[in-house]
Image: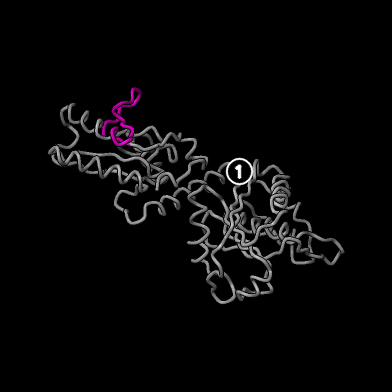
């Protein structure tokens, strides 16, 4: 499993890249992660919104999480100095914290200076930042159901200093990875949909669909979308039709194997004529769609699907399933 972290930092450290490299190696020690990457961006937003003496969760979601989600990250971390935390009024007794909000995206903040060190009662020491980051990620892994291990059994305040063992024992199944991916895709699709809940399409796809519908209407043939975004559960139910449940087989795709599941595909029907229209009408529909950069199912050879349009932007289903899509391109 790959794990991508976006760090928003208020201060530039010469050693941050090296710290991230050591953290990544620590997290990959047990083989649960095949690749761990950190990317750091400078934060110039000033004092964050607080809820009491903690950073407000809604503020964190809007400011840090949402931009990270659309870029395909698994976790967003806000890193600020000890002095900034004191000046802002953040609880001085907390080095770092992770939001437990029930989704499949990590959200944490870390208060540390570049050379801060934690001294343990047994005489050992650990870099404060390098302790806090994998600690909070450990909390998130349990929150998401990846593990039953409790990070506090391996790393706790200044009494337990064995965080390496947590990641050596960590094991993440393929089923858990898929569940996490699908949940993040569903959450991301909701964010990209914005105020268009009717079709559930990402913004760029929706705009192109609107253009196609308008042009067909000008030609005297009104159409409507019968299906846009389709959830993983809906896709699995559709796949079961004609196989394990009554009805005709209408799809070859299981949940996650359709572009509908990512909000970039839509099916259409003529409002008055239905589906049984002259071939030239479907050809006109396909021509207009392709003019706007859409792929038309009528061009397919193995499974002709004339009512279907999709916008892949060169991405494959595997790219969508493995979280390798830059969703900003669909905005």
User: Is residue 217 or residue 269 the one in the foreground?
Assistant: 217
Q: Looking at the image, can residue 91 be seen?
A: yes
290 to the left or right of 277: right
36 to the left or right of 187: right
Image position, residue 102 (x, y; %)? 52, 59
Report the residue at 36% width, 38% height from top.
311
Q: Alpha-carbon neighbours of circle 1 within 10 Å: few (<14), some, or many (≥20)?
A: some
Q: Residue furthest top?
A: 301
Image position, residue 29 (x, y; %)? 73, 45
User: How many discs mark residues in the rendered view?
Assistant: 1
* Coloration mode: one colour
Report the residue at 16% width, 31% height from top.
277
Q: Is residue 75 magenta?
A: no
Identify residue for label 1: 2
Highlighted magenta segment, given as a residue range: 290-309
SS class, disc 1: strand
Q: Is residue 199 above or below residue 212?
A: below
Q: Locate residue 107: give its quadrant.
A: bottom right
Image position, residue 206 (x, y; %)? 31, 46
User: Is residue 191 or residue 185 the one in the foreground?
Assistant: 191
Report the residue at 64% width, 56% height from top.
137
Q: Locate residue 278: give its quadrant.
A: top left
> Which image quadrant: the N terminus?
top right
Image position, residue 9 (x, y; %)? 62, 59
294 to the left or right of 146: left
Q: Is residue 306 magenta?
A: yes
Q: Residue furthest right?
A: 123
Q: Looking at the image, can residue 150 be seen?
A: no
């Amino acid at each position: 499993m790959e794990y991508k972290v976006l760090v928003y930092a208020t201060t530039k450290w010469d050693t941050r890249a090296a710290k991230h490299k050591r953290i990544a190696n620590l997290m990959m020690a047990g083989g649960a992660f095949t690749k761990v990457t950190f990317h750091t961006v400078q934060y110039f937003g000033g004092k964050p919104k607080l809820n009491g003496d903690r950073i407000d969760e809604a503020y964190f979601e809007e400011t840090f999480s949402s931009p990270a989600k659309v870029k395909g990250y698994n976790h967003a971390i806000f890193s600020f100095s000890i002095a900034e935390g004191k000046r802002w009024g953040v609880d001085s007794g907390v080095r770092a914290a992770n939001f437990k909000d029930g989704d499949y995206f990590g959200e944490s903040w870390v208060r540390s200076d570049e050379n801060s060190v934690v001294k343990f009662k047994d005489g050992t020491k650990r870099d404060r930042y390098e302790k806090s980051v994998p600690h909070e990620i450990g909390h998130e892994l349990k929150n998401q159901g990846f593990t039953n291990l409790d990070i506090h059994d391996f790393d706790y305040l200044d009494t337990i200093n064995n965080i390496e063992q947590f990641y050596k024992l960590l094991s993440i199944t393929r089923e858990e990875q898929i569940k996490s991916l699908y949940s993040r895709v569903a959450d991301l699709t909701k964010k990209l949909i914005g105020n268009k809940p009717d079709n559930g399409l990402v913004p760029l796809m929706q705009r192109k669909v609107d253009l196609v519908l308008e042009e067909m209407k000008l030609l005297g043939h009104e159409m409507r979308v019968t299906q846009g975004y389709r959830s993983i559960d809906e896709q699995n139910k559709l796949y079961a039709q004609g196989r394990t449940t009554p009805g005709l087989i209408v799809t070859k795709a299981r949940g996650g194997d359709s572009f509908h599941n990512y909000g970039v595909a839509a099916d259409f029907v003529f409002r008055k004529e239905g589906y049984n229209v002259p071939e030239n009408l479907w050809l006109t529909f396909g021509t207009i769609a392709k003019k706007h950069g859409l792929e038309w199912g009528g061009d397919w050879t193995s499974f002709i699907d004339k009512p279907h349009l999709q916008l892949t932007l060169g991405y494959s289903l595997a790219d969508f399933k493995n979280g390798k899509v830059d969703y900003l391109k669909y905005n």
